[in-house]
Image: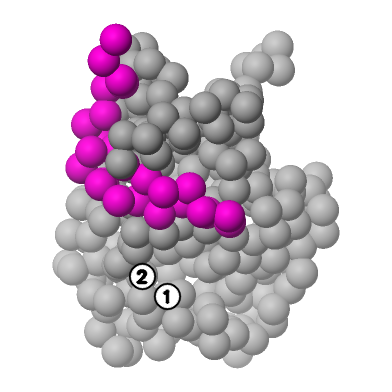
């Protein structure tokens, strides 16, 4: 009974935090897709059967419409969040309203562990670029795993190191690289095996979404995609992108003049 009451409290707290976005749709019982998302996650794979079963009892999911906030800057952080379906954009906004995109988060990605560890307000916004479904693991569940599971701690250290490398690389991209190279590196981050379980060469990613993730217009993103395709690094599909040379994307510095 206490476990059920705690789960209900977590659901109500998340609904209150999301009140400024479109109303999310609740799923009171764990769905098969939520369980599968947890099972296939990089961290879910390292849990014992008993640990995993308890997590599935405590985790829950939400649906967020396109343009809706999954999380807001300045809010308390009470959940670790993963993407079951859809595509999210992590960004920060200056006091004068200027938005800077930090990264995209595709299916299988998790975020928010740093703020949970430090118990500080969230330092960024997370917006759904298309209708999305997210999994939420309560802070108490996260802390219990951290206190009792050595494999889970190893995963967290690995994840945070990968995240640090990602953001250090983004500073390099913004300051030193051409626009085409920035798009290449942005795409490459969505195929990072340290952040996503079993990423496939194809990603369901619209061209206007690439522009939003890279912080540029759709038209300019399209020019960059054509350049990368001409270089044999990607193939632009009707509804997505197929990566032909991931190492080439990661190291692309622009077309020689």
The answer to whether residue 168 shows anywhere in this view is no
Quadrant housing residue 164: top left
* Residue underneath mark 1: 38
The region drawn magenta spans: 233-257
- Let me know if residue 250 is in the magenta part: yes
- Tell me which colouring the rendered structure shows: one colour
Q: Which residue is mark 2?
A: 41
Q: Residue at x 25, y 66 (%)?
A: 152
Looking at the image, which is closer to me, 71 or 144?
A: 71
Q: Is residue 170 left or right of residue 237?
A: left
Q: Position of residue 237 (x, y in %)?
A: 51, 54
The quarter holding residue 247 reads: top left
Q: Which residue is painted at 74% across and 46% down in the image?
A: 67
Q: Is residue 63 left or right of residue 168?
A: right
- In the current view of this chain or complex, which residue is farthest to the front? 230
Is residue 39 in view from this perspective?
A: yes
The N terminus - image quarter: bottom right
Magenta-drawn stretch contains 62: no
**Residue shown at 67%/54% (left/top)?**
130
Q: Position of residue 74 (x, y in %)?
A: 62, 34
1 shown above or below 15: below
Seen in the picture, residue 140 relative to 37 is either above or below; the reply is above
Residue 189 x/y as whole percent: 35, 43
x 26%, y 29%: residue: 252
| Residue 200 x/y as whole percent | 35, 63
Label 2 sits on a secondary structure element that is loop
Q: Secondary structure at mark 1?
A: helix
Q: Nearer the viewer, residue 5 or 90?
A: 90
Give the label on residue 213, or none.
none
Tag 1 and tag 2, C-beta contact below 8 Å? yes
């Amino acid at each position: 009974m206490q476990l059920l009451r705690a789960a209900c409290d977590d659901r109500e707290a998340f609904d209150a935090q999301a009140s400024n976005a479109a109303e999310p749709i609740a799923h009171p019982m764990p769905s098969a897709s939520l369980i599968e998302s947890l099972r296939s996650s990089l961290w879910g794979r390292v849990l014992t059967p008993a640990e995993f079963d308890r997590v599935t009892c405590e985790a829950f999911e939400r649906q967020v419409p396109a343009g809706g906030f999954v999380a807001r800057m300045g809010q308390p952080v009470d959940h670790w969040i993963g993407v079951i379906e859809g595509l999210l954009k992590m960004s920060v906004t200056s006091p004068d309203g200027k938005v800077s995109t930090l990264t995209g988060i595709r299916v299988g990605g998790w975020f928010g562990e740093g703020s949970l560890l430090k118990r500080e307000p969230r330092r960024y916004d997370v917006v759904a670029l298309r209708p999305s479904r997210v999994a939420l693991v309560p802070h108490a569940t996260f802390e219990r795993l951290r206190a009792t599971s050595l494999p889970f701690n190893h995963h967290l250290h690995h994840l945070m190191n990968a995240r640090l490398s990602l953001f250090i690389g983004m500073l390099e991209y913004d300051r030193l690289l051409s626009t085409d190279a920035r798009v290449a590196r942005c795409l490459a981050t969505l195929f990072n095996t340290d952040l996503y379980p079993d990423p496939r060469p194809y990603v369901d990613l619209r061209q206007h979404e690439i522009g939003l993730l890279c912080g540029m217009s759709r038209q300019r993103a399209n020019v960059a995609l054509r350049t990368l395709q001409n270089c044999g690094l990607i193939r632009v599909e009707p509804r997505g992108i197929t990566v032909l040379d991931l190492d080439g994307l990661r190291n692309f510095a622009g077309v020689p003049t």
